[in-house]
Image (cartoon, grey):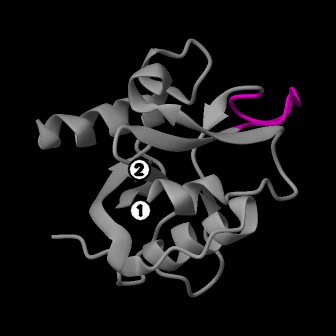
Amino acid sequence: MDNPTDIPKFHGAKIALLAKDEVLVLLRDDFAEIPFPNCWDFPGGGVDFGETPIDCALRETAEEVGLSIPATAISWARPFHSRDGTQRSWFFVAEVSKTILQSARLGDEGQECRLMPCSEFLAQDCAVTYLQERLAMYLSTKS
């Protein structure tokens, strides 16, 4: 089984930060040259040399929304392959208090960050589709 504390070959990581039935989302920049412009996203991004998947997700969270989330808050982790099978990434879920998520502040990328009900994120027409699928997969394990 894959271990998110190992340093396997992977492209990047994303993390859903949940407070009960809400998730922290970022509105991506509206630049035509980036994937999913002007769509709702989760913190995360590409790996830096030598990082584990968890290190990558937590570093990106600190950079993008100014939150230092402890690795112990992560309650779910899964590796995924891109639809064409060429890239591997990790998806994490961390459950934290609403107070912590309300202190999130947008970094250098994106237009907005805010808490959104999970049901609203899943219903968005303009969200990163594979993250909607992964969050739905996680939520199905909770019911």
Dot 1: what SS? loop
The residue labelled by disc 1 is 96
Q: Which residues are magenta?
A: 27-37
Q: Is residue 32 magenta?
A: yes
Q: Identify the residue shown where x is 62% and y is 53%.
A: 102
Depth check, front residue: 99 or 64: 99
Q: Amino acid at mark 1?
A: Val
Rendered location of residue 5, percent (x, y): 35, 83
* Spatial CA span between label 1 and label 2: 5 Å
Can residue 13 be seen here? no
Q: Is residue 69 left or right of residue 122?
A: right
Q: Identify the residue shown where x is 79% and y is 53%.
A: 106
On residue 19, which mark appears? 2
Q: Amino acid at mark 2?
A: Ala
Is the magenta region chiefly helix, strand or loop?
loop
- State which quarter of the image contains the C terminus: top left
- State which quarter of the image contains the N terminus: bottom left
Rendered location of residue 33, percent (x, y): 85, 33
Eyeballing the image, is 49 above or below 75? below
> Quarter of the image holding residue 66?
bottom right
Rendered location of residue 63, percent (x, y): 74, 68
Count neighbours of disc 1 (C-alpha within 10 A) and say few if under 14, some if 14 to 19, many if 20 or more: some
